[in-house]
Structure formats: C-alpha cells, structure tokens
Image (tube, rainbow, N blue to C red):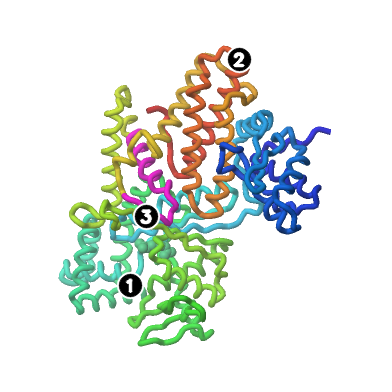
Amino acid sequence: MTAPTKACQDLARQLSDANAAVFARLGLEPKHAAVRRSDRPDLGEFQCNGALAAAKQIGRKPQEIAADAAAAWDATDLADAPTIAGPGFLNFVTTARALSARAQAIADDPRAGASAVETPRRVLVDYGGPNVAKPMHVGHLRASIIGESLKRIFRFRGDRVWGDAHFGDWGFQMGLLIVALEDELGGLGDPAKVAARLKSLTLEDLEAMYPAAAAKARDDAAFRDRARKATAGLQSGEEPHRTIWRAMHDVSMAALKREFSALGVDFDLWNGESDADPLIPDMVADLKARGLIEEDQGAQVLRVAREGDKRALPPLLVVSSEGTAMYGTTDLATILQREREIDPDLYLYIVDQRQGDHFEQVFRAAELAGYAKREQLEHIGFGTMNGPDGKPFKTRAGGVLKLNDLIEMAREKARARLREAEIGADFSAEEFEDVAHKVAIAALKFADLMNFRGTSYVFDLDRFMSFEGKTGPYLLYAAVRIKSILRKAGEAGVAAAPIVIAAAEERGLALALDGFDAALAQAYDKRAPHFLAEHAFALAQAFSAFYGNCPILQETDAGAQGSRLALAQATLKQLEITLDLLGIAAPERM
Ligand code: ARG
C-alpha cells in the first residue's frame, strides 16, 4: 500500500506527524516530536528540539534519544534521516520528491496551501472607529488598516466575520456641535432657519465648528454646561437636537465612506454608538435592579476593580451626573445589541492600546452583567504612528494630520516615484492615476502592517514608497513582474507541467510557498498581520532568486520549463492572496 498523500498539509506538519510516529515507537511522548522551521538553515530546513524534553522525562541522555530517533526514522520519502546537532537537536532536510508534491498541491489549491479552522466561529471585528464631525486622523488609519486585515484573515480561515465601524456619533461631541450651531444661528427657535442651515451644511463646516467648539468648552464653563445639556437633550430625543444630529451624521458619513473606500476598507455594519442607544434605558434599569450599579457623586457607576489588580481600575461610568450615556455605556449596550443580533463567539476591538483601561472596564462590566464572557472579548491594541520626533504624528503646523491629506500626500509621492522609475509613460491618465493610487495605499498599509501591531513606528513616506526593500511598492512590483512573465510565457505558448524541484532556488521557492499556512495561522492566532507581511516579503525574495537562476522562456527542457511556469503561477496566486489579506491590491502592470 502506498502512503496516502499528505501534501495538503505543510511540511512541518507532515514531518511532525512522521516524527511523532517514530517517538511513539520508541516509547517517547509524541508531543515532544514537534518539528518546525529551522532557525539555523545552515544545519537543516526543519528542526525538532523535543529530544531534550523527552530525555529529561525518562532520565536518559538527549543525544542518545536523538540518535535512536534518527536511526528509527523511516519516512524517507519525506526527508532524509535527521542529523543531530548540539545537545540533541534533530535537523531535517526534505526530499525533492516531498517538496515537489507539496509545491504541486499548493499550485492545485485555489487557497494556495492555506488550511482553514476546524470549527468556524462567529467573529465581530470592531475597527476604524471614526468620529462623526471630526476628521479622521492617523490613529484611525492604523485602526482601519489593521482591522481590515484581521477581518480578511479571519474570514479566509473560515470564520463568519462581521466588520463594524462603530462610529463615534453619540455623546458630548454632538452636544458641542449643537450649541455651536445654536450660537451661529443666534438660537434654534426658528425651524425654517435651522432647516435652511442644515441643508447647506458641509463637512468643511463641521470640521471648522468642532475644534472651535471644543476649544471654547475648555475655558468657558457656561458653554460646556450648555453642551452637556444639549447632549442630554439629544439622547432623550428632543428636537431640534435630533434633526441637527441626523444632518451632521449624514454629512459626515458620506465623507467617511469616501475615505474608507479610497483606503480599500469596507464594513459589513456601518453602525455607530447611537445605534445602541435604544437599549440603554432597559440596560441601566436591569443593572440597577440587579444591584450592579451604584450612585457616586450624582453619577451611576459600575465597579469593576478586583482584588489582586496591580493598578486600581476606576469604575465604569454608566450614567453621568447630567443623565447622559458615556463612551463606556454605549460600548456596553453595543455588546448587548451584538449579542441579540449577531451572537458572536469572539469580539475583536481594534483600537489604540492607550484605550486599554477603557476596554478592561467594559469587558469586566459585560462579564459581571452576564452579557458576554470575558474570554470572548479581546482588545487588540496597537501603537502609534510617530513623527520624526518619536511622538504621535502631527502636521508641520502641529495639528493632527487628516487622513485625506495623508492619502493625497502618498499619492503625490507615488506619482513622482513612478515618473522617476519611468513607469507608466505609455499609460492613459486614468491608468496612471489608478496605479499611483494602488502604490500609495500599498506603501501606507505595508509600512504599517510589517511591524507587530503593538510597536509604534515612524512615518517616513520616502522609505515607505521605495521600490526596493521591505515595502508595499516592492511587493506590487514583484506581483506585476510575475504577471508580465506569465503573459509572455502565454504568448510564447509555454504550458504548465508537473512541478519537479531540482535547483537550490527552486527548493527555496517551494519552501517559501510552504511557509504560507503557518504564517497565516500565526497571524490568526496572535491577531497580528505582520506574520503575513513577513511571508509576502520572503516569498517575493525567494521568487526573485528563483527567477534570476531558473529562467522560463529561455529554458530548453520542456519539463523544467513547464514546472517553473507552474511554480511562477503558484507564487503569483499565493502572493496575491497574501496581499489581499493585508488589504493590498496589485495593478495589472506597472
Ligand atoms: N471613536 C473612538 C475613537 O476615536 C474609537 C472607537 C473604538 N471602538 C469602540 N468600540 N470603542 O477613539
């Protein structure tokens, strides 16, 4: 009987299984047999360090155990018998046959070798989080980029996923805008006058009104008080507050949708804080009835501190002394709403890590109230995008950089880079703009996603936009180059043939292709897209080395030529999937 083909699993998994069988035969615990990519490629492609733990358990020398395991190795189709290094590390080199079969399986698989989760879950990804009437800034850029990627990663792994923008469209900022409008119009008593003003309201108006009102509220207690009252009025459904809110909401929403679409970010739910408002009265009554909230200086709070906390976690403010719902209130009510409407198994909140305490409060409150379990709720924090001074990025004038301006800045730089590289001289104006836009977005997104999300990074458009090195534009260029190779091969009538791995660079490329599934699983498990960014770069580099030494068009052996073509096709497919999981789209040519 021939062994069933295992090539749908990655090589580390195949090796682990074979090694576990060896360990079991030797009476060793199979859990110690795990094989992974080697971090010493000079010694082997894969390694198992488990002989050390296995030896300790049964009181023998690790080197003896390793020698026994190596001698008992029988999966010679998969890898040669392992060599032993240092205190008892097993190093494996896969056979050309196993590598060829694995590359072929990836080439034949529409998912390019990616496995899926065994039990799909329902996952709610809360990301983006822009605020109505305030321009989006670079903090929202990170939330949008990371959230979009995680949403795609979870969906690709087989979960059922909902992305929700959770707009900041409720609360004090709306009250501020209402009183700002009141002052501008000299009162809100005349409905016709209010209606006429709302009709002409633009995003620019709101963007001017908000900072002025926020500044005024800082030094003017009476103004602040009026804004609080207006917030309470809005939340209790008063007019014209509701009408004003609706108009401001709609103007903002249209602009936000444009910006998100430019970024390649799309939500399944375009909900806001306000959508959970109808649940708040019952929620508060329920919390009160169950003795979960208490009065504190006129406000109603839910205590979430626990014994053993390293730092005192302040209580969650559920109802302010003015009777208004707060940021945490809407977040808690939104959990209730999502439980009813979606019933997620897992919630991911992609929000600046400086909001860590807020989410800890909300999550504990949700658990205390029995709305969701603590382990279902995850705050996926991220660091800041910094300026050259190492502080969160500001414009030259010291203000927050608007996302729109940032995207336009990146596009301008992309146009210049394309012209410098003499790319697109023969493109129509439309195609040139499309390519410049894709290069700009790829540069911004990749520069963000290549770092572990918790790490802050410095905004450096020159570096992000380079066609060389670990950048978005380099990866687009790599994808486009393979497309052009495939086009030319097609024109020359070259057809794909079974993959046969021979040259070292073919081996390198097959190993890179094989690494996709593990990168994806890590990105998924750690909620960290940088594992995939890393993979995209490694794959592009392996392809570049491959193509430098293993030509396709000039190859005279039809078998080798067809095999290489199939490898190039598999690489493009996997690279495009990986880029797509990062939220990056490649042009047809550049
Ligand atoms: N609007 C908030 C901000 O700008 C982010 C919202 C994050 N999501 C949430 N469920 N609280 O900081």
Residue 201: in sight, yes or no?
Answer: no
> Is residue 461 or residue 259 the one in the foreground?
461
In the figure, is residue 310 to the left or right of 198? right
Q: How far apart are marks 3 and 1 (CA)?
A: 38 Å
Is residue 447 rendered magenta in the image?
yes
In the rendering, at what x and y percent does residue 514 appear? 59, 37
> Is residue 94 or residue 302 the one in the foreground?
94
Number of the front mark, 3 or 2: 3
Q: Which amino acid does label 1 sit on?
A: Leu
Q: Earlier in the sequence, mark 3 or mark 1?
A: 1
Q: How far apart are marks 3 and 2 (CA)?
A: 50 Å
Span of residues in magenta: 435-458
Q: Earlier in the sequence, mark 3 or mark 2?
A: 3
> Is residue 230 or residue 147 the one in the foreground?
147
Q: Mark 3 points at which residue?
A: 456
Q: Name the residue under label 2.
A: 558
Q: In this view, does 296 lie above or below 190?
A: below
